[in-house]
Amino acid sequence: MGVASRIDLLTAPSPPKTRRVPVSTNDVKAAIGKVQIVKEVQHGVVQKPTFKGASKVIFSFQSIVCASYICSFGSELAINTILGAYYLKNFKYLGQTNSG
């Protein structure tokens, strides 16, 4: 063993230390051991949508409130613009930035 190989051994990085992680005997993904299925998951069956079910969702209170806000959003922007122009015209001391 020469001098160069001894220097290589001293400066070579040491191999990473590995730790052993204990393996659970109940692994859900691998379906190993006793695996309990949660009761809430068992009743989640996807059904084909019907007109009656869709109409219940469409005409629910939350959907009507959301739809009315979406429909009035353009009006809200127009009113804000008109008010900004009104304040700029009648209250010149506010300036363009503070008027609207």
Image (tube, grey):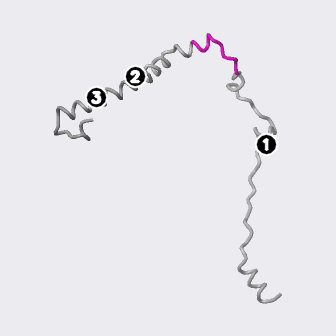
Which quadrant of the figure has residue 75? top left
Q: Residue at x 79, y 40 (%)?
A: 30
- What amino acid does circle 1 point to? Thr
Q: Which residue was labeled with disc 3?
A: 82
Three-letter code, disc 2: Ser
Residue displayed at 75% across by 38% down:
28
Q: Position of residue 100 (x, y in %)?
A: 27, 35
Name the residue carrying label 1: 25
Q: CA distance from mark 2 to mark 1?
A: 58 Å
Q: Secondary structure at mark 3?
A: helix
What range of the chain is rendered magenta? 46-55
Q: Earlier in the sequence, mark 1 or mark 3?
A: 1
Mark 3 or 2, closer to the camera:
3
| Residue at the image position 74 percent from the left and 84 percent from the top | 7
Quadrant of the image for the N terminus? bottom right
Q: Is residue 29 above or below residue 64?
A: below
Determine the CA span between mark 3 and mark 2: 15 Å
Residue 93 is left or right of residue 61, and the answer is left
| Dots 3, 2 in contact, CB < 8 A | no
Find residue 80 and report its horizontal and vertical position in percent.
Answer: 31, 29
Q: For mark 2, what is the residue?
A: 72
